[in-house]
Amino acid sequence: MTTDPAPAASVDASSLPKAEFAFPGPLRDQLVAAILDGSKTSTTGLVADYEHGQEALPEVGRRAVVVDSDDRPVAVIEVTGVRVVPLNEVDIAHARDEGEGHTTVAEWRRDHEEFWHGEEMRQAMDDPSFTVQDTTLVVLERFRLVIDLRTAR
């Protein structure tokens, strides 16, 4: 796990955008824990979700504050890579680096489709029949942990 040598005081987390992984609850807690222990260094988003929320895609160098299920800031991450590809082009390295224990792209895709086809995602997209397919564009984001705010307090 690589972190900045700069002291926590040099990172103003309150001025950074939020990085929210999944929806509040057990999955978010699992993903945040994986970020904090260094096993999660990538994530996947849907271009359609960014467009729906009128959000810009992540850019290399952008920092954000990771929040837990209680909306508490727990870490600062920095984007180190961004690729936009069709869903069927996600590779095993990206899937493994998501830190969820997937050993095949098929496992990774099954779990992600379950999430994307779930009620919370369909509500967030304002589309009760939202689905993804091979050609659905996804954002493959790589990041590094800059600082664990829990230990910097």
Image (cartoon, helix red, strand yellow):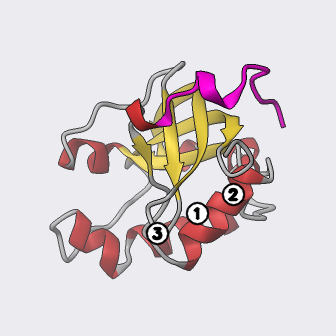
Picture residue at 69% right of the left edge, 36% below the top:
147
Task: Tell me the amino acid under the disc marked 2.
Answer: Val
The residue labelled by disc 3 is 70
Where residue 131 sits: x, y (%)? 32, 67
Report if residue 95 lies within the magenta region: no
Q: Looking at the image, which is closer to me, 72 or 135?
A: 72
User: Of the residues under marks 3 and 1, which one precedes in the sequence?
Assistant: 3
Residue density around tag 2, few if under 14, some if 14–19, many if 20 or more, within 10 Å: some
Picture residue at 32% right of the left edge, 76% below the top:
120
Q: Looking at the image, which is closer to me, 34 or 12?
A: 12
Picture residue at 73% right of the left edge, 52% below the top:
36
The rendered magenta stretch, by its main secondary structure, is classed as loop
Q: Secondary structure at mark 1?
A: helix
Q: Which mark is residue 109?
A: 1
Q: Is residue 71 above or below residue 63?
A: below
Picture residue at 26% right of the left edge, 72% below the top:
122
Report if residue 4 lies within the magenta region: yes
